[in-house]
Image (tube, coloured by chain):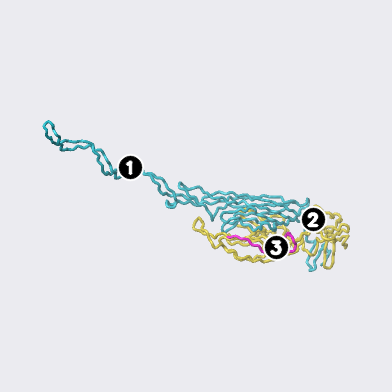
């Protein structure tokens, strides 16, 4: 086994793994074969698919997971009614409002990429989380420089929206795009850092998994047709398909990742 | 913390023993970060005023009057004066100078005299007057035409040959013009204006619902990969929708008026800035 200024091969099986740390450039990379490390010193194109890690590349390191249950308060329908001009029907006048909830704080000091779950589903932002008749409550999660917020927009017509509890999960990712410090690789009993901090046990990284925490996708996860909406989550599960939807969207299964 | 290299696997665990890095489970890198602002206008779906109901209004409630003329046989008491030729016997005495005495006798004196009296005068006359008549009422609504719309924009591309696997998207959206319907007002949107939300896959921008039911209008934006290129598709769909709670009334005196209802302004404009992280897994 060689570390700084050398390389480590694991080639007992068919597919070798190589960890190479360059003593001159400081570059550290791990790739899925036993080719000459010079091959991957400045990877491009198809070479990128061979790399498990490369200090020249950018990564997202999960640094915070937020699990919060919010009790959305009751939204009472209007007490006043209007009479329809047709027939003898009356209807309650619409009421509409918004609310913000702070789910948690964070210390990134900037807006960072994130993945959000509405309830147990990796739903699109703007999805209705409660419907009673035509009354509806929809939410979106957003991130500021200091915290994670939930935005609620509700509207009532003939029905009151009763108080409802919903659980939200948010994965926040640190952008590890620029190396920090001058340590190419460092291993201590409580420290593992490589690539000038880009690979660090302080973070959790995306790892493809059959028991994923969430999915990443390259595809659409919803469609509209005939006025209706169909949402197929990135795990392939059809979450919403309104009675008015007339299309044939089937979505696609993304890649499950664990962190 | 542990670092191990065995059985073709390089693995790093943290001080809790949790796996941080493992070559047996591909770990992606971010091949590109793309930022792009797009302003998209969802066009108006188009409208048609339609008749929801017609009514005939009674003369009392119609405010309609008609100028009607009739031939009527009318009798009137009229004070009528006429010159009448009348003769009468008058005893007249005239002095006769020959006999130097009055000579008297009856003479017939005729002449026109005016005679006046009330008479019943009857005849056919044309009589005209304004009268209250029935009216006509049309109750109109607006019908939004069914409409499908889609427009795709290019956000940017990853470096050639990357062949990326996924994207993580942030989106900062502002609805600068909000479409609306007369029944329920502005379309419902849960997108916080100006805030950064996650936009992986698709995002529901705004919706409108039929009373008590499913959406009749839905608008989404989807971010997806097309080879090396990241694209954003703004898609709209609405079924035909006729106003159910609001209507316009038109009255007329000479037949049912045509339907007349102001259109719904279904046009919305979204100003969206995308921040896209393009990811690539190890093969």
Q: For the residue carrying disc 1, how many other residues have a C-alpha within 10 Å: few (<14), some (14-19), or many (20+)?
A: few
Q: Position of residue A115 (x, y in %)?
A: 71, 60
Magenta-tinted stretch: A95-116
For chain B, what colour was chosen?
cyan
The answer to whether dots 1 and 2 both sit on one chain is no
Q: Is residue A105 magenta?
A: yes
Which residue does the numbered mark 2 point to in the structure image? A49
Q: What chain does badge 3 belong to?
A: A
Q: What chain does badge 2 belong to?
A: A
**Marks 3 and 2: in contact by CB < 8 Å?**
no
Q: Is residue A88 visible?
A: yes
- The image shows residue B261, relative to residue A72, as above or below, that is above
Q: Position of residue A221 (x, y in %)?
A: 68, 56
Nearest to viewer (mark 2 / mark 3): 3
Q: Secondary structure at mark 1?
A: strand
Q: Residue at x 53, y 61 (%)?
A: A80
- The image shows residue B159, relative to residue B15, as above or below, that is above
Q: Residue at x 27, y 41 (%)?
A: B81
Label located before the other in sequence (2 or 3): 2
Which residue does the numbered mark 1 point to in the structure image? B124
Q: Which chain is yellow?
A: A
The answer to whether dots 3 and 1 both sit on one chain is no
* Pick the front one: B142 or B83: B83
Residue A76 picture quarter:
bottom right
């Amino acid at each position: 086994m060689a570390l700084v200024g050398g390389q480590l091969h694991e080639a007992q099986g068919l597919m070798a793994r190589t960890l190479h740390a360059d003593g001159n450039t400081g570059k550290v990379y791990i790739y899925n074969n036993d080719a000459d490390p010079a091959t991957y010193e400045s990877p491009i194109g198809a070479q990128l698919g061979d790399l498990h890690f490369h200090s020249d590349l950018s990564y997202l390191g999960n640094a915070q997971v937020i699990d919060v249950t919010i009790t959305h308060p009751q939204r009472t329908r209007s007490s006043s009614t209007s009479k329809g001009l047709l027939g003898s029907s009356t209807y309650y006048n619409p009421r509409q409002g918004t609310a913000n909830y702070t789910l948690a704080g964070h210390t990134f000091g900037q807006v960072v990429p994130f993945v959000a779950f509405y309830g147990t589903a990796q739903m699109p932002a703007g999805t209705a989380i409660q419907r009673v008749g035509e009354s509806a409550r929809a939410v979106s999660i957003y991130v500021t420089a200091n915290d994670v917020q939930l935005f609620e927009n509700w509207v009532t017509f003939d029905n009151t929206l009763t108080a409802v509890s919903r659980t939200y999960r948010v994965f926040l990712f640190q952008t590890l795009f620029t190396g920090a410090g001058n340590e190419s690789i460092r291993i201590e009993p409580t420290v593992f850092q490589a690539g000038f901090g880009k690979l660090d046990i302080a973070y959790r990284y995306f790892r493809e998994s059959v028991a994923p925490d969430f999915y990443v996708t390259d595809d659409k996860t919803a469609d509209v047709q005939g006025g209706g909406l169909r949402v197929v989550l990135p795990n392939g599960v059809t979450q919403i398909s309104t009675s008015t939807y007339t299309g044939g969207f089937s979505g696609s299964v993304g890649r499950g990742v664990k962190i | 913390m542990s670092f191990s290299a065995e059985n073709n696997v390089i693995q790093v665990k943290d001080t809790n023993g949790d796996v941080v890095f493992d070559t047996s489970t591909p770990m992606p890198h971010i091949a590109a970060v793309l930022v792009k602002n797009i302003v998209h206008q969802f066009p108006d779906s188009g409208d048609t005023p339609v008749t929801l109901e017609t009514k005939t209004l009674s003369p009392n409630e119609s405010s309609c009057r008609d100028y009607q003329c009739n031939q009527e046989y009318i009798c009137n008491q009229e004070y009528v004066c006429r010159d009448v030729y009348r003769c009468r016997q008058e005893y007249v005495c005239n002095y006769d100078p020959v006999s130097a005495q009055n000579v008297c006798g009856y003479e017939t004196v005729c002449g026109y005299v005016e005679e006046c009296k009330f008479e019943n005068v009857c005849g056919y006359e044309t009589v005209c007057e304004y009268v209250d008549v029935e009216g006509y009422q049309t109750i109109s609504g607006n019908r939004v035409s069914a409409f499908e719309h889609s427009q795709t924009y290019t956000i940017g591309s990853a470096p050639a040959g990357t062949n990326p696997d996924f994207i993580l998207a942030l989106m900062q959206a502002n609805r600068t013009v909000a479409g609306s319907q007369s029944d329920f007002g502005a379309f419902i949107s849960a997108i916080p204006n100006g805030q950064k939300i996650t936009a992986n896959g698709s995002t529901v921008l705004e919706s409108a619902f039929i009373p008590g039911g499913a959406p009749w209008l839905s608008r989404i934006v989807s971010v997806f990969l097309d080879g090396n290129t990241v694209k954003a598709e703004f898609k709209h769909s609405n079924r035909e929708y006729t106003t159910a709670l609001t209507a316009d009334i038109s009255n007329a005196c000479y037949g049912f008026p045509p339907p007349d209802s102001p259109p719904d302004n279904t046009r919305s404009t979204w100003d969206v800035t995308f921040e896209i992280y393009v990811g690539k897994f190890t093969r």
